[in-house]
């Protein structure tokens, strides 16, 4: 473990105290949680389905946005059996706006797995066998729904532990992941795994925030390495930076009478299973000669940022006098029915450019 150092003997006492007294750390967090923990509906139940659903929705999503989606899913599909019986298109439509649509597809597949198993696995190991369930999600469900003493490690936990213990090992490295998981597990009070896991996650989200953390009111500040060394803004450390590539897209809103053409995206690229408007490169060359002279440019270079890509989209309105022959995997639908289809967020933004 790589630790921040300090020349003063008193500091080494604090550092040693941190490691020799893990229960003091846990007890402080639990007391903080009792006074400051967030009131969330999935915390009022030990229903594995409700807890699992919340964890999947809140991956890459803030609670303020995810709460309404969780409520909608619970209302539309109150049990895992109901969700398993839904179609993928229905699930993708309900997910629309949350992004990272592989989560929705995995959610649907996992629900079907649970039904086949006759219920949710009740162990960390068993839960990891479900589609889309990794270490963090399995630990959250296992500890909160079933009381298994297994520690969660997410962005909040990385931040709290790296600052408090002054750990400089990059959190996105193999060594870092092992180090933080081992430390997190050693701090977990086996008698209160659910409360402790929720406590440290809330502490990172509310108190020890990524920027402008509330150190002056922090109950751990006196023994926090980063606070004492004034290195709070330096931790945690990441070694890798995500490279984003620009990608240019052109979409045609082909309107013939009351109908428009749409296309469902396939596997192997972004937005699998979602619906979009035709792209010229997927159409016959003869159509290209027509739309280029007849279509109206509605928006040039609309920017949409994904994790690994920066999309720049041009959007055209084409109202041909004759209905064009499109490839067999395109369909014509009534304009009013478009709301029934799951659309990428970018397409939702482009739709706002269409004249009313």
Image (cartoon, rainbow, N blue to C red):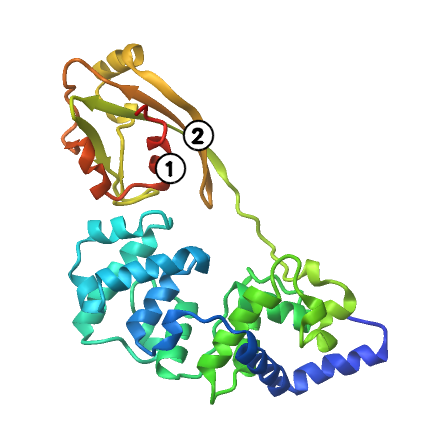
Disc 1 is placed on an element classified as helix
Residue in view at x 22 percent, y 16 percent:
287
Q: Is residue 142 above or below residue 2?
A: below
**Dividing the picture into quarters, in which one does residue 58 lie?**
bottom left
Disc 2 is placed on an element classified as strand
Mark 1, other Cα within 10 Å: few <14 / some 14–19 / many ≥20? some
Q: Residue furthest right?
A: 8
Q: Is residue 279 above or below residue 269?
A: above
For the residue pair 77 and 332, the one nearer the viewer reads as 77
Going by the image, does 238 lie left or right of 145?
right
| Residue ID for mark 1 | 346
Q: Residue furthest bottom?
A: 191
Whole-percent x, y for residue 289 in the image: 26, 11
| Residue ID for mark 2 | 302
Q: Is residue 159 above or below residue 123?
A: above
Going by the image, does 331 lie left or right of 71?
left
């Amino acid at each position: 473990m790589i630790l921040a150092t300090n020349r003063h003997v008193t500091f080494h006492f604090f550092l040693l105290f941190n490691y020799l007294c893990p229960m003091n750390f846990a007890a402080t967090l639990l007391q903080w949680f009792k006074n400051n923990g967030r009131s969330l509906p999935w915390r009022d139940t030990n229903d594995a389905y409700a807890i699992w659903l919340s964890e999947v929705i809140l991956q890459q999503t803030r609670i303020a946005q995810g709460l309404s989606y969780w409520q909608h899913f619970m209302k539309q599909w109150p049990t895992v059996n109901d969700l398993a019986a839904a179609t993928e298109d229905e699930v993708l439509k309900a997910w629309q706006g949350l992004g990272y649509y592989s989560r929705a597809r995995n959610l649907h597949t996992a629900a079907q797995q649970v039904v086949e198993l006759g219920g949710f696995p009740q162990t960390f190991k068993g839960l990891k066998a479900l589609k889309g369930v990794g270490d963090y999600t399995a630990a959250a469900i296992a500890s909160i729904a079933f009381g298994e003493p297994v520690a969660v490690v997410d962005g909040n936990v990385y931040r709290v532990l790296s600052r408090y213990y002054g750990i400089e090992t990059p959190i996105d490295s193999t060594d870092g992941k092992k180090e933080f998981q081992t430390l997190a597990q050693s701090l977990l009070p086996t008698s209160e795994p659910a409360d402790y896991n929720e406590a440290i996650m809330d502490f990172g989200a509310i108190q020890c925030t990524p920027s402008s953390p509330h150190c002056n009111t922090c109950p751990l500040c006196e023994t926090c390495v980063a606070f004492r060394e004034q290195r709070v803004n330096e931790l945690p450390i990441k070694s890798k930076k995500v490279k984003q590539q620009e990608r240019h897209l052109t979409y045609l809103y082909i309107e013939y009478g009351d109908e428009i053409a749409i296309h469902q995206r396939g596997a192997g690229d972004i937005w699998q299973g979602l619906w979009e408007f035709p792209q010229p490169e997927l159409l016959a060359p003869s159509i290209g000669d027509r739309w280029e002279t007849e279509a109206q440019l509605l928006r040039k270079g609309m920017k949409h940022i994904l994790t690994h890509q920066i999309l720049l989209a041009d959007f055209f309105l084409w109202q041909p006098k004759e209905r064009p022959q499109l490839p067999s995997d395109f369909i014509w639908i009534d304009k009013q029915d478009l709301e029934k289809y799951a659309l990428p967020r970018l397409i939702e933004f482009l739709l706002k450019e269409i004249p009313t």
